[in-house]
Image (cartoon, grey):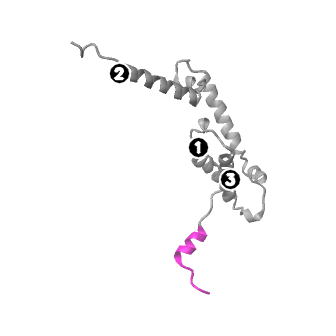
Amino acid sequence: MAAVPREAKHHQDQVTPALPIKIRLYESLVLAILPYCAETWPITEANRKRLEGFHHKCLRRILNISWKDEVKNESVRKKTDQSLLECTLQKRRLRWFGHVQSMENVSRARQALHWIPTSWKEEKRKTEDYMERHDNERHQPDECDEG
């Protein structure tokens, strides 16, 4: 029998944490930071798929399930008692919306919530009007120069 290096023997003796501890660590370390400020993100379909993919990859890693094992994401979520990340983001958005609705009308967040952007053409027109007025003012003779 070949001698086992001391480092390898040390790794064999280590006990892995139980599943509930792994899940709790994942929730507190990853899920607390991953959707940071997600209340204001415009979530596209591509970004939603990326986030869900990362979420399921982490859950599979916790359970030691390879993608080669052909286990459905739904069963992975059931084993870990997790929901779709999309549902978590929706709950956060609703909570944030309720918070903003309870603010005073003068708060910037409340104003941003009800902000209606002007079209690009209107903004361009305003800029052109300003520049025309500015040019006209510049070309008018100054009363102080005549004196």
- Residue behind mark 1: 32
Residue 53: assigned label: 3
Kindly identify the amino acid type of the residue bearing the numbered disc 2: His
To which quarter of the image does residue 94 belong?
Answer: top right
Q: What residue appears at the point 59 percent right and 66 percent down from the top-left corner?
A: 14
Q: Is 13 in front, or is 95?
A: 95
> Does the stretch in magenta take in 25?
no
Q: Specify the principal SS of the magenta part.
A: helix
The region drawn magenta spans: 1-13
Q: Earlier in the sequence, mark 2 or mark 3?
A: 3
Q: Earlier in the sequence, mark 3 or mark 1?
A: 1
- Residue behind mark 2: 139
Q: What residue appears at the point 35 percent right and 21 percent down from the top-left corner?
A: 139
Residue 119 coordinates in the image, percent (x, y): 59, 28
Residue 17 coordinates in the image, percent (x, y): 63, 57
From the image, state whether disc 1 or disc 2 is nearer to you. Answer: 2
Kindly identify the amino acid type of the residue bearing the numbered disc 3: Gly
How many other residues sit within 10 Å of disc 2, few (<14), some (14-19) or many (≥20)?
few
Mark 3 and mark 1 in contact? Answer it, CB < 8 Å. Answer: no
Mark 2 and mark 3 in contact? Answer it, CB < 8 Å. Answer: no
